[in-house]
Image (spheres, grey):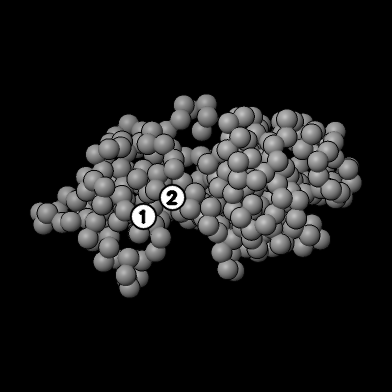
């Protein structure tokens, strides 16, 4: 298939590379010219503008966006809309707030443009070798892009969640669960590190990764992090939050659903920015391992 792809950051570049390897044709656009040069070397066609990208695609157009949530999505849509036609499909694969996705879908539907919200999980490795996708929106649009979804994911790693907003809602809750899991791991390893036994935490994580009830990818990433530095002294335990945890807690309040573990993990991230405990360094290390997240939080205005 010939696809438009906008946004060649860490996740987007890896996803675009995977689509090229699976035989798809890509017309790409990014505000950073060097990113387009790199992906063009792998076989993509670089466009000078979103309008040029649209003009290079067959109709109905399929355009995948991997841009930061909020204003960047709206500005991208604003640039695209004049060049779009009824029947075209836009996919937001970023971590947009589900309420924003519902509103964007309603507004675009008035022009006959179909909008899918695709929650993307799996970190940088998943983006390159097989991610997990949770998709909401018009069912016929989902079915039209299903070959793309299949080529971007691991086996059984994608699904139709329901109407517009549901894909990003499911991804939001996924990230809330992720917050709680990483916080529990951080606290557990913090207790191990404080014990009198002089434990090799890399070895503990290795053992727990094989056959234990708490085995899994996060535990494997913990093992990787400890293999580099058992004390994780190369980073600070200041843990950023990118929005999904807050949105999960807000949604729980709205629906009157109790989520004390997720809420506590969110507040622990806030607290981490004034402390530097070992448990916080574990959480920071896990975020860096799977998502390439920086060791210190961005300025408050960017959170």
Q: Is residue 166 visible?
A: no
In-image side of 67 versus 140 (left or right): left
In-image side of 263 versus 98 (left or right): left
Please determine whether, in this image, residue 191 is positioned above or below residue 55: below
First reached walking from the N terminus: tag 2 or tag 1: 1
Q: Tell me the residue at 32%/31% (across/down).
A: 274
Q: Tell me the residue at 15%/56% (across/down).
A: 199
Counting from the top left corner in percent of width and height, residue 203 is at 22, 60
Counting from the top left corner in percent of width and height, residue 99 is at 68, 44
> Is the residue marked by circle 2 packed among few (<14), some (14-19), or many (20+) residues within 10 Å?
some
Q: How many marks?
A: 2
In-image side of 169 versus 188 (left or right): right
Please determine whether, in this image, residue 276 is positioned above or below residue 220: above
Q: Which residue is mark 1?
A: 221
Counting from the top left corner in percent of width and height, residue 294 is at 41, 36
Whole-number angstrom distance, CA of label 2 to CA of label 1: 7 Å
User: Which element is circle 2 on?
Assistant: helix
Q: Is residue 183 visible?
A: yes
Q: Tell me the residue at 27%/38% (across/down).
A: 234
In-image side of 177 versus 138 (left or right): left
Looking at the rendering, which quadrant does residue 42 occupy? Answer: top right
Nearer to us in this view, 38 or 113: 38
> Is the residue marked by circle 1 packed among few (<14), some (14-19), or many (20+) residues within 10 Å?
many
Whether the residues at callouts 2 and 1 have beta carbons within 8 Å, the answer is yes
Q: Tell me the residue at 31%/49% (across/down).
A: 225
**Identity of the residue furthest to the left in this view:** 196
Looking at the rendering, which quadrant does residue 50 occupy? Answer: top right
Nearer to us in this view, 58 or 260: 58
For residue 290, the mark is 2
Counting from the top left corner in percent of width and height, residue 110 is at 88, 43
Q: Quadrant of the N terminus?
A: bottom right
């Amino acid at each position: 298939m010939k696809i438009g792809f906008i946004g060649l950051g860490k996740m987007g570049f890896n996803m675009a590379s995977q689509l090229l390897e699976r035989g798809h044709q890509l017309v790409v656009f990014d505000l950073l010219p060097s990113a387009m040069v790199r992906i063009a070397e792998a076989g993509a066609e670089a466009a000078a503008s979103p309008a040029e990208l649209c003009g290079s695609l067959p109709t109905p157009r399929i355009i995948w966006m991997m841009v930061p949530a909020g204003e960047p999505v709206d500005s991208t849509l604003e640039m695209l809309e004049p060049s779009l036609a009824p029947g075209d499909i836009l996919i937001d694969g970023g971590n947009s707030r589900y309420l924003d996705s519902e509103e964007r879908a309603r507004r675009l539907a008035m022009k006959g443009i179909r909008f899918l919200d695709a929650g993307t999980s799996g970190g940088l490795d998943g983006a390159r070798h097989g991610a997990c996708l949770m998709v909401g929106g018009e069912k016929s649009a989902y079915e039209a892009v299903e070959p793309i979804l299949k080529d971007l994911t691991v086996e059984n790693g994608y699904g139709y969640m329901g109407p517009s907003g549901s894909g990003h809602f499911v991804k939001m809750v996924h990230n809330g669960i992720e917050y709680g899991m990483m916080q529990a791991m951080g606290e557990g390893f913090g207790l191990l590190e404080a014990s009198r036994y002089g434990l090799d935490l890399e070895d503990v994580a290795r053992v727990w990764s094989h056959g234990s009830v708490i085995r899994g990818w996060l535990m494997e990433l913990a093992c990787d992090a400890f293999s580099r530095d058992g004390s994780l002294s190369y980073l600070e335990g200041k843990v950023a939050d990118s929005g999904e945890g807050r949105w999960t807690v807000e949604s729980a309040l709205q629906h009157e659903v109790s989520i004390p573990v997720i809420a506590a993990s969110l507040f622990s991230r806030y607290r981490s920015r004034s402390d530097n405990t070992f448990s916080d360094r574990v959480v920071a290390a896990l975020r860096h391992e799977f998502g390439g997240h920086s060791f210190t939080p961005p300025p408050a205005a960017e959170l």
